[in-house]
Amino acid sequence: MSDRNTLKIAAFAAVTFSVLGGSVLVSADDGEAELLARAQAMFKPLPDIAETADRPVTPARVELGRALFFETRVSSDGKQSCAQCHQPMFYGTDALAESVGNQGKRIPRNVPTVFNTALQFAQHYGGNRVDVEEQAVKALPSGLAYGNVDLAEAEQRLRAIPGYRPMFEKAFPGEAEPVTADNWGLAIGAYERTLLTPAPFDDYLEGDSSAIGAKAKRGLEKFMSYGCSGCHGGVVLGGQMFQKFGITQNYWELTGSTEKALFKGRDKGRFHDTKDEADAFMFKVQQLRNVAVTPPYFHDGSVATLPEAVRIMAKLQLGRDLGADDVSDIVAFLETLTGEVPENFVNAPVLPIAPFLN
Amino acid sequence: MSDRNTLKIAAFAAVTFSVLGGSVLVSADDGEAELLARAQAMFKPLPDIAETADRPVTPARVELGRALFFETRVSSDGKQSCAQCHQPMFYGTDALAESVGNQGKRIPRNVPTVFNTALQFAQHYGGNRVDVEEQAVKALPSGLAYGNVDLAEAEQRLRAIPGYRPMFEKAFPGEAEPVTADNWGLAIGAYERTLLTPAPFDDYLEGDSSAIGAKAKRGLEKFMSYGCSGCHGGVVLGGQMFQKFGITQNYWELTGSTEKALFKGRDKGRFHDTKDEADAFMFKVQQLRNVAVTPPYFHDGSVATLPEAVRIMAKLQLGRDLGADDVSDIVAFLETLTGEVPENFVNAPVLPIAPFLN
């Protein structure tokens, strides 16, 4: 953040200097200033941390949560962890169209990146998890994820690794039994709330007009003018509402999505969580940070490349046929949303040993 | 290595100083010196790198090999990689008794650490891989590991990730088609040859008598006197020969090992590779570096703790009933074999993206 603040001050100083020098702002500069102002009204730069009043991010919780994020021994087959699907090598995804879970079971949805996800209004494609903490807890008894029979079994596995007790005690002081599934969720959530990836677009939003190139600016302008930002706005460019996927036609006609056994047909999104026909084909609007480095695309990873995904979205959601230049400009803009992988994520922790027999 | 060399020089300087100062070596020092001399005859400190004339370790090969080590997309289920079984969090193991491979298949053997393994005379419990390079290549078509039909399929998957081509070209200059399974093996092997973990015992072997404590020295003395070092000698304290597991009685009478479907009964070690009855129950003698931090123990992970494993080994191989002090001293010695996890291993690489559809 301090780097971005420095840039902000530098940009301000440059403007001041040109005023003092008596120069007149030319229309190109006006256009630049107007674009920036429009963008600032529509989007927000990343905060330093995704903390809320009831989800405090303390160093002890982050340290514990980081360990638990990489911990495999709590899963029933001894191989699943948060990091198993949200991998350091792939910008917090598994780089697959559809994921593979406990006992090799196929999960018919594409893993979204864990980066910046805590800033979304809900978790999962159907929004059936209110926040990252709930998501982490409910993965434990899920047959596709950790595969435990219930939370008690997960807690038993966690307690069988003695090295975790002092870490839980430090993260949740004063609790009679801190090694619980709920605290598993709170700790992992605290860690995930640190996994934010500031990108060139944040520098731009904070006033450094040089942070993104001319082509990306053209893409930004089109992204707003064509209406993409109507849903993909805010701090993570999405993640703030549900929206029907396939407004102008059925999504699978363009994505090529197949029927899925788990859904007994097409994936109808939030409908599978609520059983309410009004939710049929409603999906959480995905965030777009790091979208350029997390192929393949859509809830089932049915589309391989970003240009194709942009073209399909414009058609399905806005009824617009984008030309090749439009697609290429918008992709250039989306590339400015690629941040650095957090150091605290690339470096896997060494975990407490335990005499673990599967 | 430079740290250890500095210590070596410091130790030499200390001796010189005491001679110049006119002091006489007391008998405790004689005992210390004798123990060190015995140890130096039996063991060797780690080299900086496990390079051989025909297995060159170049920076380009190591960089490529590190990426490939963490690469999951070459496996048929999109989830297997070297790092999947040799994990950064668990000292290059998966911390399970028996591993889980492609499609959730159970592998009835315990994953040995990848650290220092290139210094062994062969790979796998049955020694059916001559070196780490061959091990890496032959994992590709293995149904339990990467699960490809054949090497051609693995190569096809590798070539589908365009970012790898320039890395292969750099690592294997002048080759018409460098993206091959053989070069996959050579690159991963080069990387693994850098994964060495110098430990306090190396400092001791290089002359720093203070590098290990009095209890560990008693354990070292017993380890040699009782005959453990007869098999567990050399640079990685093992890994130089085959030996029958269970000389005085059947191993499963003490380890509690169960019958395994894959082996149609008890695991008979090298026999399953050679089908020669002379090889029944012959296993490669395991290296002991990092043994204290890589539970559980033995080829099937049937024993949970190191003290129990030491007690069982003495009984099975040497017919000796160790007392509690013996076990505790030997464990203290084995703990001096714990090194640091290499930085190049804890930090996962960010891998080239590709439109990968599974």
Image (cartoon, coloured by chain):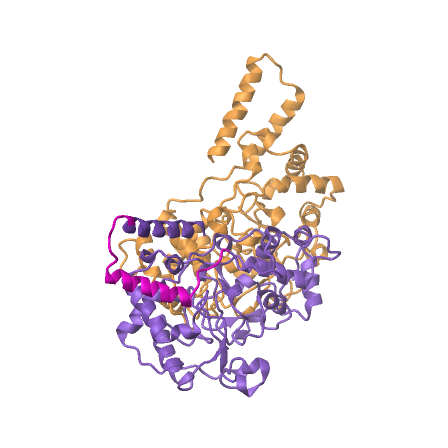
Chain colours: A orange, B purple
Image position, residue B262 (x, y; %): 55, 81
Q: Is residue A312 magenta?
A: no
Image position, residue B108 (x, y; %): 51, 76
Please, is residue A38 above or below residue B356 in the view? above
Residue occupying the point 32% across, 72% down? B222
Image position, residue A287 (x, y; %): 56, 47
Q: Residue furthest top?
A: A22
Q: Nearer the viewer, residue B55 or B344?
A: B55
Q: Is residue B150 left or right of residue B346?
A: right
Please state the extent of the stretch shown in magenta in the rendering: B20-48
Q: Is residue B40 magenta?
A: yes
Residue occupying the point 74% across, 39% down? A325
Q: Is residue A217 left or right of residue A349?
A: right
In which quadrant of the rendered image does the C terminus of chain A lie? Answer: bottom left
Q: Is residue B81 left or right of residue A194?
A: right
Image position, residue B120 (x, y; %): 51, 68
**Quadrant hosting residue A338:** top right
Can you see residue A358?
no
Q: Nearer the viewer, residue A39 or B211?
A: B211
How many dots with numbers?
0
Can you see residue B79?
yes
Please, is residue A202 above or below residue A182 in the view? above
Q: Nearer the viewer, residue B243 or A46?
A: B243
